[in-house]
Image (cartoon, rainbow, N blue to C red):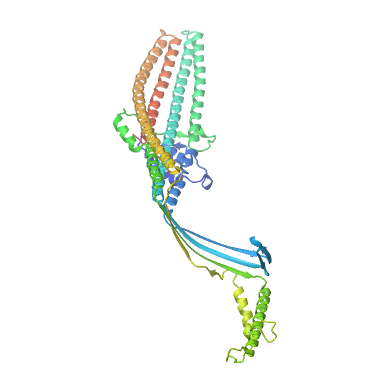
């Protein structure tokens, strides 16, 4: 069997795994090699694609944990409208607004929260990401085992069809020979009928083996993640699985599995993540720090500008009256104060000569002060705060989290050990299966040679008139069975090697 690079195939799959709707419908080549089958499976098998979908969330979790160590920035803004009227507040207070207003605001803030957990969490997420990547690799190994096993099963079914076809050819030849001997008076009708019965039985067997071969290809195409079409029988499988005596050493396989088996690596990464989680839980007893700052501003504009002007006129008229009152008092003084009198109270209050309207400069100032919505903000003072939090008494909630995290770490450590024990036992079992399959194949090879020699002797005896048709039919059936047994033994050996490779986590041939 040619050397296969699962790592290279996984790299190919990283470019090939795209949504099926975004690419042309996959087509199975009419001559399908194992490498092509694995490439198609990694691109289209739904179970494997589902496993790969966990990669991006795991990477996003790492990014989020790393950026969480930096300050968080936020910006907000808004606008509002308030109608004219009175609002009542507690204590009998009433606020009256003579004009509807529109307002806007903004706030820019930054906050920075630091604790020991903040710095441990990225390492936890990286360990979880490594575990996810190992899970994806394990899914790839499982897919390789599944597709390769089914590919071998399809090859075995095709080989059994060839054996059945050869048997049918022998039956046809034997029937013709029996008829010829009957015509010469050297055989009876029983011989002919026996040959016809054997031919019919093997015709049925051929149909059954052909059906099994078609079903094996349909199942192979399904595992590739592609719908099987009506021309599935036209798919040719021509992978050269060579035969070589297994020389695997158990110690070497176990050592390789500890490094290559993705299920073991996944368990180890999860064990590390749980150890870091326990460390993070213990760090919750340490102080945490917070720092925050912000900038803000607002606008408020009256939609009824005339109401503002009217209020300003009333206020100016009050100022004018107060000015006139003060002038009257100053004029009554026996010793007037030089320069204390105000000559023009209307001008002083900002009113025109009529006393019922503001001067142009006053009107312009009111309009300018009111024209602020939505972006002429009045800035508020910057705020800055710093805090330190130290847990003193939390009702043993931190102790509970620590106990749970440490128990989870202990469980993950046992899960790693359990996975290693399972892998070791599986490798031992599969290595025994490989060696047994090789020995059984050698025995079946010798048996089919013996059956072939027995058939030649039976045919010679029948042709010489000393043998019987039944003896010859039995010899033919023995040859067919020995050929089927040999084919089964050969492909059982290949399946055993594939299962051993899956347990180790990498190709071995």
- Name the quadrant containing residue 505: top left
Residue extending farthest to the front is 334
Q: Nearer the viewer, residue 108 or 491?
A: 108
From the viewer's perspective, tell me whether residue 221 is left or right of residue 498. Answer: right
Q: Quadrant of the C terminus?
A: top left
From the viewer's perspective, tell me whether residue 98 is left or right of residue 211. Answer: right
Measured as percent of width and height from the top left, residue 137 is found at 41, 40
- Name the quadrant containing residue 297: bottom right
For the point 49% across and 61% down, the residue is: 109
Q: Quadrant of the N terminus?
A: top left
- Name the quadrant containing residue 443: top left
Residue 316 appears anywhere in the view:
yes
Measured as percent of width and height from the top left, residue 393 is found at 44, 46
Residue 89 appears anywhere in the view:
no
Q: Nearer the viewer, residue 389 or 247?
A: 389
In the rendered picture of this protein, how many numbered marks are placed on residues?
A: 0
For the point 49% across and 34% down, the residue is: 234
| Above or below, comparing residue 1 to residue 170 in the picture | below
Measured as percent of width and height from the top left, residue 12 is found at 42, 44
Q: Nearer the viewer, residue 447 or 37?
A: 37
Q: Nearer the viewer, residue 424 or 345?
A: 345
């Amino acid at each position: 069997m040619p050397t296969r690079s699962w790592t290279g195939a996984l790299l190919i799959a990283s470019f090939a795994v795209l949504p099926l709707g975004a690419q042309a419908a996959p087509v199975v080549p009419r001559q399908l090699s194992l490498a092509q089958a694995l490439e198609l499976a990694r691109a289209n098998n739904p179970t494997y694609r589902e496993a790969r979908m966990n990669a991006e969330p795991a990477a996003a979790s790492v990014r989020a944990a790393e950026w969480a160590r930096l300050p968080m920035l936020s910006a907000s803004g808004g606008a509002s409208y308030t109608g004219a009227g009175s609002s009542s507040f507690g204590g009998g207070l009433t606020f009256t607004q003579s004009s509807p207003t529109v307002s806007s605001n903004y706030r820019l803030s930054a906050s920075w929260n630091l604790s020991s957990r903040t710095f441990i969490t990225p390492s936890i997420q990286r360990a979880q990401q490594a575990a996810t990547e190992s899970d994806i690799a394990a899914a790839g190994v499982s897919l390789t085992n599944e597709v390769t096993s089914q590919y071998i099963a399809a090859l075995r079914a095709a080989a059994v069809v060839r054996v059945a076809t050869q048997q049918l050819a022998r039956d046809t030849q034997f029937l013709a020979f029996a008829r010829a001997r009957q015509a010469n008076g050297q055989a009876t009708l029983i011989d002919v009928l026996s040959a016809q019965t054997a031919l019919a039985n093997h015709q049925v067997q051929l149909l059954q083996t052909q059906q099994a071969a078609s079903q094996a290809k349909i199942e192979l195409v399904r595992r590739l993640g592609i719908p099987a079409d009506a021309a599935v029988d036209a798919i040719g499988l021509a992978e050269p699985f060579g035969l070589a005596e297994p020389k695997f050493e158990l110690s070497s396989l176990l050592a390789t599995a500890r490094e290559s088996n993705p299920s073991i690596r996944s368990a180890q990464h999860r064990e590390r993540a749980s150890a870091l989680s326990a460390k993070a839980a213990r760090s919750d007893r340490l102080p945490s720090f917070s720092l925050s700052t912000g900038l803000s501003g607002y606008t408020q504009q009256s939609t009824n500008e005339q109401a503002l002007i009217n209020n300003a006129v009333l206020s100016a008229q009050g100022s004018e009256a107060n000015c006139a009152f003060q002038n009257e008092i100053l004029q009554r003084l026996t010793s007037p104060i030089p320069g204390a009198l105000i000559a023009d109270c209307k001008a002083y209050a900002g009113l025109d000569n009529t006393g019922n309207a503001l001067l142009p400069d006053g009107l312009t100032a009111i309009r300018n002060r009111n024209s602020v919505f939505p972006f002429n903000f009045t800035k508020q003072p910057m705020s800055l705060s710093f805090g330190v939090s130290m847990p003193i008494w939390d009702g043993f909630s931190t102790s509970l989290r620590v106990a749970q995290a440490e128990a989870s770490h202990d469980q993950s450590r046992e899960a790693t050990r359990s996975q290693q024990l399972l892998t070791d036992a599986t490798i031992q079992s599969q290595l025994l299966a490989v060696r047994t399959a090789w020995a059984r194949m050698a025995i079946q090879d010798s048996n089919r040679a013996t059956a072939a020699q027995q058939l030649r002797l039976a045919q010679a005896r029948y042709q010489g008139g000393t043998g019987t048709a039944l003896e010859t039919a039995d010899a033919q059936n023995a040859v067919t069975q020995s050929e089927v047994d040999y084919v089964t033994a050969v492909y059982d050996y290949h399946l055993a090697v594939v299962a051993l490779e899956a347990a180790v986590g990498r190709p071995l041939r």
